[in-house]
Image: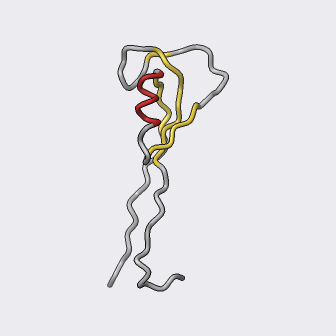
């Protein structure tokens, strides 16, 4: 029996990030980051560093397309 298992995708997370910590997430190619509310004007303490103030972001993994070797048949 040959079962193909796909790795489980992580759920998107709502976290508060300051500008410095958010820029670190923007540079990761496997992560998608987006402001939860563009009109939020009250800042909260950054969840990542715990020092600076920031906004709420939705952080989710990007779907990485699987590469085929070309030998297997496509359904």
On the image, the x and y values in percent for residue 59 come to 48, 38
Vertical placement of residue 33 versus 41, above or below? below
Q: Residue at x 45, y 44 (%)?
A: 31
Specify the color scheme: secondary structure
Vertical placement of residue 32 versus 73, above or below? above
Q: Where is residue 3, by image quadrant?
A: bottom left
On the image, the x and y values in percent for residue 57 come to 53, 31
Q: Residue at x 46, y 28 (%)?
A: 22
For the residue pair 41 and 67, the one nearer the viewer reads as 67
Q: Is residue 1 left or right of residue 36?
A: left
Q: How many marks?
A: 0
On the image, the x and y values in percent for residue 43 come to 53, 15
Of all residues shown, which one is farthest toward the right? 39
Q: Is residue 34 left or right of residue 27?
A: right
Vertical placement of residue 46 versus 9, above or below? above
Instruction: Name the image quarter holding the C terminus.
Output: bottom right
On the image, the x and y values in percent for residue 58 come to 53, 36
Q: Residue at x 32, y 84 (%)?
A: 1
Q: Residue at x 50, y 33 (%)?
A: 14
């Amino acid at each position: 029996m040959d079962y193909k298992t796909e790795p489980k995708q992580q759920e998107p997370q709502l976290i508060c990030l300051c500008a410095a910590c958010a820029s670190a997430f923007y540079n990761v190619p496997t992560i998608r980051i987006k402001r939860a509310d563009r009109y939020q004007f009250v800042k909260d303490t950054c969840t990542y560093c715990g020092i600076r103030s920031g906004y709420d972001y939705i952080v989710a993994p990007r779907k990485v397309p699987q590469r085929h070797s070309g030998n297997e048949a496509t359904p």
